[in-house]
Amino acid sequence: MHGKVKVKLGGKLRGVHFGLGSLDIYCGLVGLDEADAYSLAFEPGPRRIGALSALVFAGLANYANIHDEEVDYNVPKVQAWLDEAPQKVAEDIIKAFIDSLPKPSEEVKEAPKKGKKSASKTS
């Protein structure tokens, strides 16, 4: 799954792409695995603002990497851009992130175990 959007940040139109690449970048920035990293961004706590900024940076950097664009910014610059951006930009980025999350019907189901026989009897 992935979520993509183009938003105006830092004076230009930039792509944001959430997916495996952004997850890898984000986990590296916050120093946690994906389960703990997501809770860091969305549960109240002292590192939440930094985690949200890192998440947006990761989506921007992932898009840039995919499209062979230069990553000419860092997390503090992204924070400054977000401070100046209209609320709609944040809403569009959040929607793209939510679109990247697996939906309940898309979750991987456990594979049947080998060697298990059917419960029905044959006579």
Image: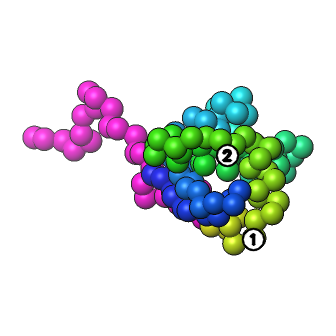
Q: Disc number at residue 57?
A: 2
Secondary structure state at the residue bearing disc 1: helix
Residue 98 visible here: no
Q: Could you say where residue 31 lies in the image, as x and y percent from the top left?
A: 71, 29
Question: Residue drawn at (26%, 42%), measured in percent from left and top?
Answer: 119
Q: Could you say where residue 12 lies in the image, as x and y percent from the top left?
A: 63, 60
Q: Could you say where residue 40 lies in the image, as x and y percent from the top left?
A: 76, 43
**Residue bearing mark 1:** 87
**116 displayed left or right of 9:** left
Q: Give the residue type at disc 2.
A: Phe
Question: Residue drawn at (61%, 36%), measured in percent from left and top?
Answer: 25
As for residue 8 lying within the magenta part, the answer is: no
Number of numbered discs present?
A: 2
Question: Residue drawn at (89%, 43%), measured in percent from left and top?
Answer: 46
Q: Give the residue type at disc 1.
A: Gln
Magenta segment? 94-123
Considering only vertical position in the picture, is 113 above or below 103? above
Most common SS among magenta residues: loop
Q: Earlier in the sequence, mark 1 or mark 2?
A: 2
Residue nearer the viewer, 120 or 85: 85
Considering only vertical position in the picture, is 105 above or below 77? below
**14 displayed left or right of 102:** right
Question: Residue drawn at (42%, 45%), measured in percent from left and top?
Answer: 108
Residue nearer the viewer, 51 or 16: 16
**115 displayed left or right of 101:** left
As for residue 97 lying within the magenta part, the answer is: yes
Q: Disc number at residue 18?
A: none
Marks 1/2: CA–CA distance: 17 Å
